[in-house]
Structures are given as C-alpha cells and as structure tokens.
Image (cartoon, helix red, strand yellow):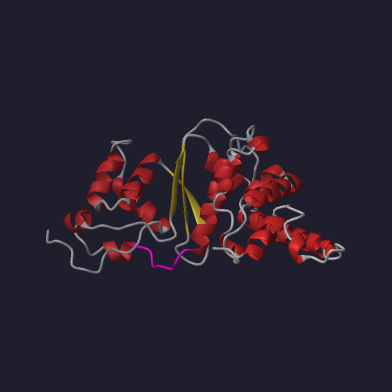
Amino acid sequence: MSEPFETAFDAMLAGDDGALDRWLPADGSGRPGLAVYRNTVAKARADALAGQFPTVERLVGVDWFRQAALTFAGTAPPTDPVLDDYGTAFPDWLATFPPALGLPFLAPVARLDLAWSRAHRAPDAVPLSGRDTAPLSPARLFKARAGLHPSAQLFWFDWTVPTVWSANRADGDATGAIWEERPEGLLIVRPAAVVTWHRLSRPQWTFLTACRRGATLGDAARDAFVPDPGLDLGTLFAGLLAMGALSQLPTEPLPHD
C-alpha cells in the first residue's frame, strides 16, 4: 500500500496542485519547483511513448502525438521506474481517444510498434533451419513440433495495417500506402541481431498459428492447405525457415517412422 506522501505525490504529478499542501511551506515557496518537476516527469513519459511508438508519431506528427502522449500519461502513469516497457495499454487507449476516432489505422499501427519493441527485447534463440530438418524423413518431420521463435509476433488483419505500418517506418516509403479493406498478414521477428518483418500469405499465417498452439508440423501443414489446396508445402516451409519464424525442434527423440 502506498504511503500518504507517495499517494499525494502521484496526485500532484497528475495535476492536483493542492495534493502536497501539508508537506509544503505555508508561504507556497515550494510550488515552482514542483511545477518544474511535474513538467520534467511528463516530458520523460511522452518521450518514452514516442520511442515506443515511432510509426504512430510519424503518421500524426510530433505535436499531435505529444499531446496524446501527455493525455495518456495523465490517465495511465507508469508502474515501473524503467520506462522501456511503458505504454502497453497505449494501443487500446488510442482506439477510444476522441481525436483518433477518425484515424482507424492508428490503434492497430500502435500494436505493431509495440510488437516490434517486444521482438527487440525477446530472449535470444537459434531459429530452426534447413540443416536441422534435412536429416529427418517426412514422416518424422511431420510428427515433430516446432513452436514459434521467442521473438515472433504474428498478426492477421482485415485491413492494410502492415502496408501502412511498414511504409511509415523510418526506412519506409509511404508512396502508394493505401488504407483499405484488404486482408494482410505480418510476422515481426528477431532471429539474429536485427528485428525484421515479413508479409505473410494466409497459408503461411495459418501454418504458424497452428505451430503457436502446439500442433505438429504435419497438422500445421494440413491446416495450411485449407485456404490454398494447391500450395507448394516445401516452398512454404522453406520460406518460413528463411524468415527465422520457428524455434528449434525438441531435443528429445522423435517418434519412430
């Protein structure tokens, strides 16, 4: 439970000018310092959100974003002194923020920014590669289970969220990036030192979704044929391995053929 001073201090940071009256000199001489401190804290929170959601900031502009960030910070102060992970509630909050209601792409774009940060901070792991699967017969491979890489963030949208997001990243090209009702899948992953993202077809997304829930590779392959009965399974699997999407196979012996 918070101490009375800590509670009052949090209230002061949120804008309650009288919250610390009982701890301040009667002549009010301490108030100017509190205002400076409040502004410094507010700026730190807004800066942390700008670092976490750079694509959102690029889409709406610095001034719009900073005002939104300050409003959010006033209603959802950080719960940890380390601000690297601050703003996990920001995408959902943006979806209800009145000035953003006419910008339906902002909240899902914010979710992708957050996913990029999560991939960046995820544990290191060696991804599954063709060298791991080449010695296995098809029967043994289909009985194996390979989860997603620890950094993998998997998405499917009914709108062109990945197009808008990737085009408005720092190294993107927004030319021709249209917000429209067209399904798109995306994988954000860091199999090595750099976070990468990859567009996914429906069969690729379906395959990875099955792996995420613990299905065998054979069951994942069966699911992938549903949206595209004519897909080339070898090409699909090789493509996912090249992305670094899957974790290594379990070290315990696989079932016999």
Quadrant in the rendering for residue 148: bottom left
- Identify the main secondary structure in magenta: loop
Which of 81 and 158 lies nearest the eye of the viewer?
81
Which of 13 and 176 lies nearest the eye of the viewer?
13
Query: Seen in the image, is 23 located left or right of residue 232?
Result: right
Which of 248 and 94 lies nearest the eye of the viewer?
94
The residue at 29%/65% (across/down) is: 132
Above or below, comparing residue 2 to residue 214 in the picture: below
Quarter of the image that includes the N terminus? bottom right
Residue 2: x and y in percent read: 58, 63
Residue 89: x and y in percent read: 55, 49
Which stretch did the figure color magenta? Answer: 122-129
Say if residue 169 shows up in the picture: no
The residue at 53%/47% (across/down) is: 111
Residue 45: x and y in percent read: 67, 58
Quadrant in the rendering for residue 145: bottom left
Quarter of the image that includes the C terminus? bottom left
The residue at 69%/53% (across/down) is: 14
Q: Is residue 124 magenta?
A: yes
Count up the numbered dots.
0
Query: Seen in the image, is 83 located left or right of residue 131?
Result: right
Above or below, comparing residue 171 to residue 120 in the picture: above
